[in-house]
Image (tube, grey):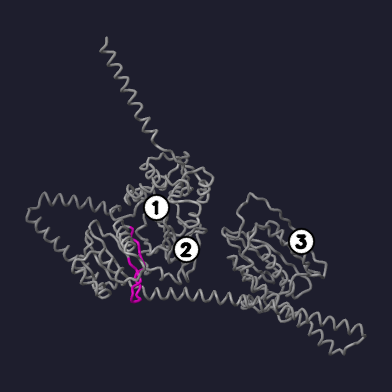
Amino acid sequence: MRRPALLLMCFSLLLMLGISLPLGTEAQTRPIRVSYGESNPYAFTDTDGIARGYAIDLFRLIAGKAGYDVRFIPALNPAGQLQTLQDGRADATTMMALSPSRLENTIATDPVFDFEINAFVVKESDITQIEQLTGGSIGAVKGSFSLSRAKAIPGVTIVEFDTADDMVIPLLSGDLDAVVSAPANLLKRLRELSIDTRVTALEPALTSSPAGILLPPAKTALQAALNEVLRNEISADDRQKLLEKWYGRDTSMFDTEAFRWFVGITAALLLVLIFFASRAVIYRRRSENLQRVHRADQLLIGALDQVSAAIVIFDKNLRAVHWNQGFEEVFPKMVPSLKAGENMRDMLMRSYTNGTVPNDWTMEQTAAHVDGVLRDMRSGANKTRIVRMDDGRVFQATDMPLGKNHFGTIRVDITHIQEQQDLIRQQATTLEAANEKLRTFTAIAAHDLKTPLFNQINLLEFITEDLQSANITLPAEVQDNWQELEMVTRQMLRLIQDLSVYATTESESQTTERFSPSLRLQEVLQVAQPRTGFQITIQDDIPDLVVNPTAFEMVMRNLLNNAIKHHDKDFGRISVRCETQADQVILQVQDDGPGIPENQREQVFEPFQRLSARTDGSGLGLAFIRKTVDSWGGKVWISSATPRGSIFSISFPRSAQAVDASTPTASTSQTMAANTAVAQMPKTG
């Protein structure tokens, strides 16, 4: 009886131990809350409400190795992710760009990877460098970060698209010279269409920003644990596998149907040959293959020698096994070191320490930089660097792996291109400084000239009153000259006032506010009634805009005033309406006046150009309009109306539109038949 009882007790103890061990292991797992933004396939919530994506899997891998159990919290965008850290709803975020503004109120782990924006061209294109895009046409997605980087390329025409898919066909057909996008997103779509082999990215990337995990300042222990994993347990291969899982991999010849058929047929033929051929035939074929490989190697070496760039190929120990003729011509002093067997690391260290590549680094900093270059090369990062030599030459340096056991380094002389870029930047800075001085001078001059002109006007009025008090009547000719003097003086004052407004247009129109254009236009008409006989109609459902409201009113007053002032009849009709398009709102002011000849429609927007010599004005009104609209990112143009008259059109880009349709705004429609001769709108030319 004792023996079964003892066995039962042992069994019970083992059972309890077996149950408690998993519980103990689970208790050691520390829970953390992680926020993520919605961006498929980087990070998103699937139809079952589960967080998925590249960033989600990568964070799970890092946190799991650090001993944390992750609960993911969705956020609308990166700003929402940062908010979850501030209000304590999350302990960390998924990988985000480590910008200075984000690091002001957070701490971050070591960079996990880099966010990049690249320019892509078709492989058949003659464009191999970003500088060759000058004068070309470039596509980018509207409102994206890629669009802002595309606009930074000098001298190009930007074509905006709603999605990245819309850019593919124009690029392949040659309608676009290049497109700008994040590599992962664009290449994913190209791989799905099996056309990624037809497109290549220009080097270097337009921008590259390190990305890491953001945490609240108090989470230093969590930061240290994650950094330990990032430094010692997460490899580039781990990231690459997850990247291929969610974004796919480049299409190669091994993925094509033709290659699979080729492999199958070749295998079948090989089996037949092995079955029927003698060993003598096999040896002969092997000999022929070796000869072909040798000839191919010789052709490759000959081709490398003809390349103008400096090229060196290293073995797995980073010792040079071949360098082309271009390297010997560009860096003749380094050839003896290569022949002596000096490895790549020693060569780089020597070039930085002996002043060949000027720098102010310490020995430790130099070693860290060189080791970083080699680490990137071994990992396949394929980064491009700009290297400035002590003799003034500038090179674009690219280091990359070549298969498993070799590495390649390429140095391209871009001295002339770099000098041009430096000159362009210097000229742009000088031009901006000159423009600022001109604006300042104009504003000061206009301000200083107002006082004497006001005094002159007052003096003329005082003299007139004195003459009237003394019952002195001037001769008719003198009265005409007196009126002409008053008119010229007031024209000069108006010119100076308009010049002051024109000089400050760019800065004054930057502050924005959401408003209803229909309501604003009604207020303009209530303050400044047109003269008798003119009827103005305003559309009542013009979409809300987000621009400077005061500048908007000045633009519309100028257009309405010009339509009335330059009308060739005592009565007329003027309409204000809008046309809504996918990416812009177009506001149109149409009149039934004499119209503007086509050959003068651009000329009238120049400063001091007047529509008619028979009307007064400074000639700055339309120049003010164009300058203001340009500062909004829009355009203004003139077209003919039917059966007569002109149409002034102003486009407001998507950035100037109020997209929050849930906020109601009042608007009215009113047709105002003018019955008064009082018009307070400023006169312009």
Amino acid type shown at disc 2: Arg
Q: Position of residue 627 (x, y in %)?
A: 62, 71
Segment colored magenta: 381-397
Mark 2 vs mark 1, foreground winner is 1
Give the quadrant of the N terminus. top left
Amino acid type shown at disc 3: Thr
Residue situated in front as seen by the camera: 514 or 250: 514
In the displayed structure, 617 sits above or below 572; it is below
How far separated are the C-alphas under marks 1 and 3?
65 Å
Mark 2–mark 1 CB contact (< 8 Å) = no
Residue situated in front as seen by the camera: 643 or 652: 652
Regarding mark 2 in the picture, which secondary structure is present there? helix
Amino acid type shown at disc 1: Asp
Q: Position of residue 111 (x, y in %)?
A: 40, 53
> Which residue is depicted at the point 16% across and 63% down?
292
Crowd tier of the residue under label 2, counting other residues whose Cα lies within 10 Å: few below 14, some 14–19, many 20 or above: some
What residue would you read off at disc 1?
110
Dividing the picture into quarters, in which one does residue 432 lie? bottom right
Identify the residue at the far right of this view. Answer: 471
Whichever of labels 2 and 3 marks the residue nearer the N terminus, that label is 2
For residue 646, the mark is none
What residue would you read off at disc 3?
671
> Which residue is depicted at the point 32% across and 50% down?
235
Mark 2–mark 3 CB contact (< 8 Å) = no
Q: Is residue 386 magenta?
A: yes
Residue situated in front as seen by the camera: 460 or 363: 363
How far separated are the C-alphas under marks 2 and 3?
46 Å
What residue would you read off at disc 2?
149
In the displayed structure, 228 sits above or below 310; it is above
How far separated are the C-alphas under marks 2 and 1?
25 Å
